[in-house]
């Protein structure tokens, strides 16, 4: 339990920095913030330019690995819960799908992210969206509340994925739908990469694809289906922040230049291994009609 809480604390602290300092997710630590880069990465994940332009500025932090809203077949009047809602991107897109009669609830364990999301909701005047502080392993939501649950590259960060899916099952209404975009492993990552990866990275807590699918089934879901699977563009995030700091220093010496070269080579090798070991998946599942 202590180890799990330590991991949660590290992730919470990592995402607090992302929320307050404008950084983004990467395999190792964090990459320098760039709204243009976030938009390009968002398009690669399946968001349209129109979708990205429709949300408040600052809602897209380039943190996802898919577009669960596009695949969730949301209808007007439905209630949607977003696990790990971050700055609110998917919540705002879902809000447009469910309309004024619908409701979207975003849950995130990082206070700074919840504050940022609430500010974005106020900025965009979203009346049908609310954000709650809480862990997705213990959702602050009543039983049988949601018609659909979505999540975007967050469950891989949790130390207890089975518990997350059980909570999602509890929160869904009978016949409710789960739509998850996430990073899974095709083969185990070398320990060197796991040890170097930042707590809030996209691969730190990823597990093998078959174990991920099995965890969903064990929670009680049926019709568990991989809708889409593809290589995540980790090569776009290969820049090591330490190298960037040195490169930006006009007084760098020969030794520093050599270190920059070593860091760049190391980052490229790491990304190559990650690309061979991971993939982004979109998974759908349903809660049986007779389940409670």
Image: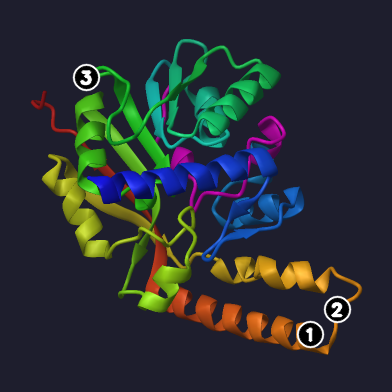
- In the rendered view, tell whether residue 225 sits above or below residue 91: below
Task: Note whether 120 is above or below 265 in the view shown.
Answer: above
Name the foreground residue: 212 vs 202: 202
Under tag 1, what secondary structure?
helix
Q: Residue at x 71, y 57 (%)?
A: 32
How many residues crowd around disc 3 within 10 Å: few (fewer than 14), some, or many (20 or more)? some
- Image quadrant where residue 61 sits: top right
Label number found at residue 67: none
Name the residue that disc number 2 marks. 252
Q: Position of residue 199 (x, y in %)?
A: 45, 55
Q: Is 62 colored magenta in this rendering?
A: yes
Any magenta on residue 290?
A: no
Q: Report the residue marked by disc 1.
A: 257
| Mark with earlier residue (2, 3) | 3
The residue positioned farthest toward the left in the image shown? 290
Q: Which residues are magenta?
A: 52-76
> Could you tell me if the residues under marks 1 and 2 are in contact, i.e. CB atoms within 8 Å?
yes
Q: Locate the N terminus and report the quarter of the image it occupies.
A: top left
Q: Give the label on residue 143, or none.
A: 3
Q: What element does badge 2 sit on? A: loop
Look at discs 2 and 3 and give the one toward the viewer: 2
């Amino acid at each position: 339990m202590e180890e799990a809480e330590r991991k949660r604390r590290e992730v919470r602290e990592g995402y607090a920095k992302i929320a307050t300092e404008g950084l983004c997710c990467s395999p190792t630590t964090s990459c320098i913030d760039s709204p243009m880069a976030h938009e390009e990465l968002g398009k690669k994940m399946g968001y349209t330019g129109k979708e990205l332009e429709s949300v408040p500025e600052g809602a897209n932090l380039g943190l996802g690995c898919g577009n669960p809203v596009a695949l969730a077949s949301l209808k007007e009047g439905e209630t949607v819960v977003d696990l790990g809602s971050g700055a609110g991107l998917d919540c705002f897109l879902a809000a447009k799908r469910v309309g004024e009669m619908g409701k979207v609830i975003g849950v995130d364990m990082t206070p700074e992210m919840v504050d940022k999301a609430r500010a974005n909701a106020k900025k965009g005047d979203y009346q049908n969206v609310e954000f709650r502080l809480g862990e997705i392993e213990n959702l602050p939501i009543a039983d049988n509340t949601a018609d659909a649950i979505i999540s975007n590259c967050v469950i891989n960060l949790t130390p207890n994925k089975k518990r997350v899916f059980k909570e999602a099952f509890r929160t869904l209404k009978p016949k409710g739908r789960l739509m998850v975009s996430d990073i899974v492993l095709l083969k185990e990552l070398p320990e060197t990469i796991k040890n170097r990866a930042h707590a809030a990275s996209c691969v730190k807590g990823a597990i093998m694809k078959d174990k991920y699918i099995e965890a969903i089934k064990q929670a009680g879901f049926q019709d568990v289906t991989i809708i889409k699977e593809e290589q995540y563009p980790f090569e776009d995030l290969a820049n090591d922040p330490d190298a960037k700091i040195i490169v930006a220093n006009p007084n760098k010496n020969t030794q520093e230049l050599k270190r920059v070269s070593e860091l760049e080579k190391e980052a490229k090798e790491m990304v190559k291994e990650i690309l061979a070991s991971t993939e982004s998946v979109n998974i759908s599942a349903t809660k049986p009609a007779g389940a409670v």
